[in-house]
Each structure stands twice: as C-alpha cells, then as structure tokens.
Image (tube, helix red, strand yellow):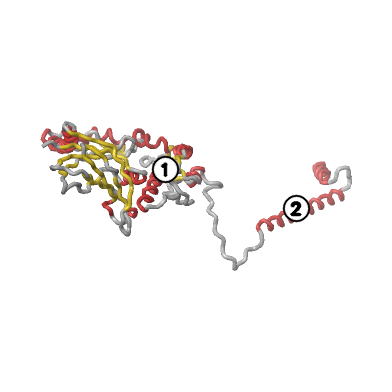
Amino acid sequence: MSSLEEREVGVAAAPGSSSAGLGVGAVGAAVEAVAGVAAMQEEVGMRREGPEPDQDEPPKKRVKIPEGESGKLEERLYSVLCCTVCLDLPKASVYQCTNGHLMCAGCFIHLLADSRLKEEQATCPNCRCEISKNLCCRNLAVEKAVSELPTECTFCLKQFPRSSLERHQKEECQDRVTQCKYKRIGCPWQGPFHELPAHESECSHPTKTGTELMGILGEMDQSYRRDMQLYNSIFGLLCYEKIGFTEVQFRPYRTDDFITRLYYETPRFTVLNQTWVLKARVNDSERNPNLSCKRTLSFQLILKSKVNSALECSFLLLKGPYDDVRIKPVIHHHSFSNDANETDYVPLPISDSVECNKLLAAKNINLRLFIFQVQK
C-alpha cells in the first residue's frame, strides 16, 4: 500500500485506532446517519406540503403576486395613495375623511355638488361617514409623497417626479409639441421642439407679400376688436352718473314640486334706492341635473320695488372678493317696469363644469353685482 492510500485509510479510521476494520465501521455509521437525515427531511417536506388535495374540493383562488418577489415600491404606493373615487393618483390637493380615506380635490368637490343636487348628506364612498368642507381636511403628507412619485412624460416617455413633470413638459422636453414663431402671420406648423429650428429656417411665411399678410392681420384685428368692445363697454358704464354694486349671497332652496328641484336665491338687497333679488338655477331646471356631466348655472335679476317710470339698467356679475371661481364678465341690459320687473334667465359665464361644481359644493355662492342706470 502506498503512502497516499495509508493517509486515506487513516483519515477514514477512528482516531487512535490502527485497524482498517474499525475505519469501515465508521464509514457505515456515517452512511446510516446521512440516510436518517434524508428521511427526516422528507418527512418535514411532506408535512409542509400537507395532504394531497381532494379531487372533489373546489379550486382555491390564486393570489396575485406582483412582479419580482415584492413588486416595485411605486406600484404598491399607487394603490395606497390613489383616490378612492376615481382610483387615480391625485394631481393637486388631497382630502381625507374622518377615517382617513383619500379623495382628490376634483372628486371631493364633485361628491359635495352631487349631494347638494340630490338634497342628501355627502358621504365617503368607502366607509359612508359624513363628509363636508368642515369635516374633511387636507393630507399634506400624501400630497408631498405623491409629488415625488415617478410618472411618464407624455412626449419623450421618460420618468420624472410628478413635482417636476410640468416644468419639464413646458420648458425642457425636446419632444414637446410647439408652434412656429410665425403662427401669428398664419403658419400652421406644429411639431416636436427639436425640429423647430429646422422648420423656422425653411418657413415660407416670413417671405409672404404684404397683400397676403393683410388678410391674416384682418382676422387678428377682428378678435382684438371683440375683446376691446367688452372693455370699452365696461369703461363706458363706469362713466354713468348712477352706479351701484353690492356683494350678493345665493342660498340653496328647493321647489315645492313633487320632484323637488334645486334653485338659489339671494336675500333682498338695495341698490340705487331700489330693492332687488337674484335667483339662479342649475341646468335650466332640468329634471335630474345630477345625472349630467355638463353643469351650468343661469340667473335672473328681479326688481321688487314699484317704479313710476321705466328703469333702464345694465348689469353684470363678477366673482366675489374671497372666491377663486373664474367668471368672464358679460354685460346684460333690461328695461324694468311694474309689468316687466324681472329679466330672462341668462347663463352665468363660468368657464366649465368644474367651476360650476365648485360653486355647487360651497355652502353659499358669493358674487358681486354691478348695476348701471342708463340716463335718458
């Protein structure tokens, strides 16, 4: 036996023994121990797996496992921080009910407006607790967390924090849609920002003749004249001798019909030594305005005093000093008398249904009324 084989037998043999038979016995004991451990592992595995499933038992629902072991953190935060109404991440203010359920500003205002139209108490869509502007508060922590979540630019498809996305899309993105600087003289080109220099160097509009440019400038002048006509009319009214204005507060009421309808009315107020009332209605008093996505408000001015002769007036409504609703000024004219003491319903010039929902969600609608008496 070589020296290498002697070393191998010595390692296999028990310490202090010189017989090869004892080494074989130790090897056998080791094999039995390994077999025992394998048997124990197999038994433990069977316990973990449990008994074989019954064929008659209905299949269990599969649990959705996110990508990877635990899913991306952003995906999990989306489901936690999303609005409970529209299931989308809030873009501006975030409100929460008394139980902590989140609502974006648009959905919160819409819920309050719907409750006003239905004459019901607004409730959280999750827990059905009462919600109002006094009961709910903003969640600034969620607003900050949402602003740091990544979102995709609609132009270049790159990821940016939501707080910096607006600035990127308006000023930095090379793929953002832009217009030619010669659009004021009729160039209709629109395209990505990185193609703008090449287009402007080849644009044919700067080389147009004066005759061609006069037609384009004529259309621009018409739009300018319409705007200036409104401002000149307002400036002209401010030159009248008798001018009155007041803050008016529209309060919600219900009609006495079988199917009640929402309308608004102001308390009586005095302007130009006369007593007046304003009334307003939603969607021209249609049957179910809460089922309509498009919502409008219209109003009428009513003279409550008795007059000896016709009172010719111009009037307009503007937003109140503490409201953020956007109202475009529109001048209305009417000749008031004892027989014609109220105007027709005219639309309140708000920009869209979102602004209308803001007014409906408020407890009262606060506006400013100007009345100009036309001197004969």
Q: Position of residue 325 (x, y in %)?
A: 31, 40
Residue 183 in view of the camera = yes
Which is in the foreground here, disc 1 or disc 2? 1
Residue at 37% x, 51% y: name it. 114
Residue 55: % across, % down:
60, 67
SS for tag 1?
Answer: loop
Callout 2: SS: helix
Nearer the observer, 60 or 94: 94
Which amino acid type is shown beneath numbered disc 1?
A: Lys
Q: Are marks 1 and 2 in contact (CB under 8 Å)?
A: no
Tag 2: residue type?
Val
Give the crowd class for mark 2: few <14, some 14-19, many >=20 residues within 10 Å. few
In terms of depth relative to the viewer, which is nearer, 133 or 51? Answer: 133
Placement of the C terminus among the 4 image quadrants:
top left
Q: Which residue was labeled with disc 1?
A: 133
Label located before the other in sequence (1 or 2): 2
Judge by depth and name the residue closer to the eye, 223 or 160: 223
Across and down, in percent, residue 91 comes to: 40, 41
Where does the N terminus fall, quadrant-wise? top right
**Residue furthest to the bottom:** 56
Is residue 191 in view from this perspective?
Answer: no
In this rendering, position of residue 33 left or right of residue 321: right
How much space separates mark 1 and mark 2, taking CA atoms? 68 Å
Q: Decide: is 45 above or below 163.
A: below
* Number of numbered callouts drawn: 2
Where on the picture, by quarter, is residue 226?
Answer: top left
Residue 37 marker: 2
In the rendered image, residue 246, in percent from the top left (x then y), is placed at 26, 36
